[in-house]
Amino acid sequence: MGKCFSVIIPNTYKLNCFIMGPAAVGKTMILYTLKLGEANTRNWNPTPAYNFEVNKQTMSHGAKCEMHMWDLSGSPGNRALWPMYYNAVENANVLIFVVNANDRRQAENCRGEFQKLVHESAFIHAQKLVVNNVHRPADERMTKDDVYEVLGIDSLDHQTQEIDIIEMNASNYELVKDIEVKILNYFQMKLRGRAN
């Protein structure tokens, strides 16, 4: 699990990306907005266990990238099964934790699970993103600073504190695409560092 990524065939890399968070925060919408490559306003049924899709991309230097995206159910009964998925892959490369910007209490209740995830050995070397999904415009919605405080990111040790918070609406393709761009940029930087 200490490796950064897997090579499938020469010049093709595999990244395992895990989308996690509580139920009904927009995880599945993020997955399929990326997969379909368009705005997505469908009302998705609750995920019974997981959804899995592969998004193929080309990085700026021409290498191919297969993003193996796991959308794991956020229902309380299924959260205990999360380690079964991320410990079963060779490398857990990306942790995407999604919260509902309009539900501060739900995010507060997930603080312990989030902190446990970022300290898991599977994610020690992973890129870590938090998506603050704005379901509807509202004065009481959480800002990036609120999410930083609510999830206790400021209290994490230096090894786990490098967490990028992205604010978006998960049905907006242009905004969701930013997740993919950040992941690809991060791993291109890692590849350049490995080459030096």
Image: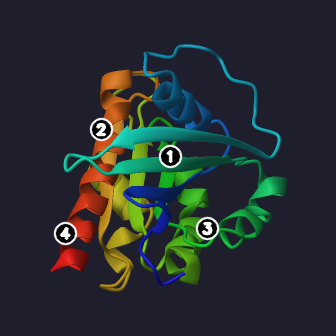
Please say if 172 is above or below 163: above
Residue 192 badge: 4
Dot 3 alpha-carbon crowd within 10 angstroms: few under 14, some 14 to 19, many 20 or more: some
Classify mark 1: residues with Cα within 10 Å, few (<14), some (14-19) or many (20+).
many
In three-dimensional space, the C-alpha distance between marks 3 and 1, rounded to whole angstroms, equals 12 Å
Q: Which residue is mark 1?
A: 99
The residue beneath circle 3 is 113
Give the side of residue 84 with respect to residue 67, left or right.
Answer: right
Tag 2: amino acid: Asp
Q: Earlier in the sequence, mark 1 or mark 4?
A: 1
| Residue 194 in sight from this viewpoint | yes
Residue 54 in picture, x, y percent from top left: 57, 41
What distance separates the C-alpha of mark 4 from that of mark 2?
A: 21 Å
Residue 49: x and y in percent read 80, 46
Give the distance between the C-alpha atoms of the residues marked 3 and 4, in whole angstroms: 33 Å
Name which residue type carries label 3: Glu
Report the residue that reaches farthest toward the front: 10
Q: Is residue 127 above or below residue 49?
A: below
Dot 4 falls on a residue whose secondary structure is helix
- Image quarter (top left, top right, bottom left or bottom right) of the N terminus: bottom right
Sequence-first tag of 3 and 1 = 1
